[in-house]
Amino acid sequence: GAVVSQHPSRVICKSGTSVKIECRSLDFQATTMFWYRQFPKQSLMLMATSNEGSKATYEQGVEKDKFLINHASLTLSTLTVTSAHPEDSSFYICSARVGGASGELFFGEGSRLTVL
Amino acid sequence: DAKTTQPPSMDCAEGRAANLPCNHSTISGNEYVYWYRQIHSQGPQYIIHGLKNNETNEMASLIITEDRKSSTLILPHATLRDTAVYYCIVRARNTGGFKTIFGAGTRLFVKA
């Protein structure tokens, strides 16, 4: 299947700092990527839909100024957690759609953020 | 997207078939059934999908009832590495910007 790569896989930061997580589609172009977060023992929660060349669409309750998403190319989307706090500690996962609107979703390995 | 109902957890003996059920009684005619799984601390992995016919690939088989209100994912010979959370999702395929919404899933424990 298609490969979606996330970096970093783990990051620890101090409260108040910003953290950037990258999501890359390695062997295909992705016009749309999705960002999820997952707390321990819970399911994945969709945060936003990232569209190449346009603004991201955020799910209800997700602060767009807190979670900045940039999708500047067909192979890269970034999620920046601004002014991170301990409650932002979570597992962040991206996914990308292969083959256009009817394509399948493939997921990255996830990035675990710990805010001290 | 239609909602799905799955048992919270299941056990399976290693080497035996694991049959994971999913109810999706409100599924629409243009919605597909997708299965993903998530091994601990990893991103979800696509397993299989189908519309109305049964499907099989190298990982699993998908059996969809004739009325499409439920389906079963079958892992024919479960191994310890199949221990994971399995998610059944229904969604329309040919819709621009469609979102994949995850439910609680079924936590499958494969035991030696």
Image: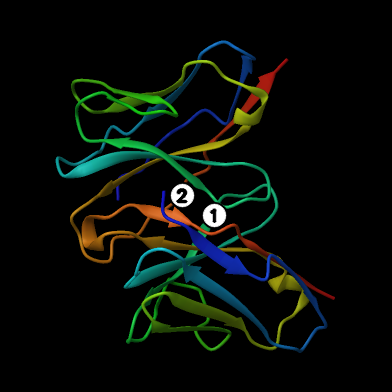
Residue B52: x %, y % from top left: 19, 29
Residue A100: x %, y % from top left: 24, 63
In this figure, which residue is indicated by the disc labeled 2?
Answer: B102
Residues marked 2 and 1 touching at CB (< 8 Å): yes
The outermost residue toward the left is B29
Residue type at numbered disc 2: Phe
Q: Is residue B48 above or below residue A75?
A: above
Residue A71: x %, y % from top left: 42, 82
- Disc 2: CA contacts within 10 A as few (<14), some (14-19) or many (>=20): some
The numbered dot on residue A44 is 1
Q: Is residue A16 above or below residue B86?
A: below
Tell me how many marks there are: 2
Residue B19: x %, y % from top left: 47, 18
Q: Could you say which is closer to the camera, residue A34 or residue A72? A: A72
- Disc 1: CA contacts within 10 A as few (<14), some (14-19) or many (>=20): many
Which of the 4 quarters of the picture holds residue B47?
top left
Residue type at numbered disc 1: Leu
- Letter of the chain that mark 1 sits on in the rendering: A
Please name the residue shown 52% across and 71% down the image. Answer: A23
Which of the 4 quarters of the picture holds residue A9?
bottom right
- Letter of the chain that mark 2 sits on in the rendering: B
